Amino acid sequence: MIKKISIILLFFTLQNNWAQVIKTEVKDSTSQWIKVNKVGLDISQISFVNWNAGGNNSVSGLLKGNFIRSYVKGNFHWKNELIGRYGINKQEGQEMRKTDDQLQINSTFGYRTDTISNWYYAGKFNFNTQFANGYAYPNTDLAISKPFAPAYVFVGIGAEYSRKDLNLNLYLSPLTNKTTLVFDQRLANQGAFGVNKAIYDSNGALIQKGENTRTEVGILISNQWKKEVWTNINLENRLSLYTDYINKFGNIDIDWQMQLAMVVNQYVKANIGTHVIYDDDIKFKEERGGAQVIKGPRVQLKQILGVGIEYIF
């Protein structure tokens, strides 16, 4: 037992020293690149033995990563971000189920005319998809989403207001192209995620396949803000609003994420988060008698509460 404890203490000591060395090297480097890497794992487990109130044994895990590469030189800045999340849950008597799934790439390039202004001429690229199939449980025969089904690509130009002292970024684009990708033909034939669906004759024979892409041009407004609201408690807010010029102008797609991160120590952190999505092109599917029934669009809400280990290097 004492030997195991000694090994654990030695591991954390070496890990801490390694982190300090990395931080020193980054600080002393003459490179214009700023690098931030965060990886984390949240795990929750509950089990019962002769528990009078009843309950199901379960275990959940969430693996997450956030990698940032920023280049700053003179009046130019270029920020790149990769976000990945994947969570699963296993309950007694049920198959393993997905709880979280996100793959996102952000890239923003900006130029300002002087060193005083906080406004930049900016171009922005954003890509969103997922790692694995999604299902309307308990039906695991027909996926309601897949990798690249959907995937969203935003490319636009506009202006960015950036304040490092406030950890605030506001991006305004009057011209943004949004491309929706549905690279699964069954979902494309259904017209999922807003693509044009397949055409059938009166006998149900396929005349024309559903389209795999949909292109829109509209207005994009996005915001990112971070603030330490209390000692070791940080609030991060991300909001994206988009409306298409041609198809239902004024009908706004909303993607809003808010997270409260609480630092326990150098490695252990707790977080509470919400994610709200509304997209008129995303139709809700529900199970009725073993069959999927497509309904109208609805507000999507995800709430996250986790405690786990996070390592920054």
Image: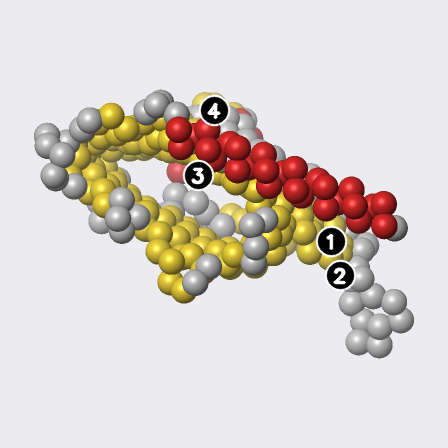
The residue that disc 2 covers is 46
Q: Give the residue number, with chain letter if any, for mark 1.
A: 59
- Select label 2 or label 4 by which is in front: 2
* Mark 1–mark 2 distance (CA, rounded to whole Å): 6 Å
**Mark 4 touching mark 1, by CB under 8 A?**
no
Marks 4 and 1, the one that precedes in the sequence? 1
Q: Earlier in the sequence, mark 1 or mark 2?
A: 2
> Is the residue 107 above or below the residue 116 in the image?
above
Name the element at disc 3: helix
Q: Say which amino acid is labelled 1.
A: Val
Label 2: element kind: strand
Q: Secondary structure at mark 4?
A: loop
Residue 15 higher or lower than 296, as above or below? above
Residue type at mark 3? Phe
In whole angstroms, how far apart are the C-alphas of marks 4 and 1? 42 Å
- Residue 115 percent location from the top left of the image: 13, 34
Q: Which residue is mark 3?
A: 193
Horizontal arrangement in the rendering, residue 95 relative to residue 23 (left or right): right
Measured in 3D between alpha carbons, the distance from the residue under mark 2 to the one under mark 3, in whole angstroms, is: 36 Å
- Residue picked out by circle 4: 209
- The location of residue 12, given as percent across then percent down, is 67, 43
Q: How far apart in space, not on screen, are marks 4 and 3 (Cα)?
A: 15 Å
| Residue count near mark 4 (Cα–Cα under 10 Å), binned few <14, some 14–19, many ≥20 | some
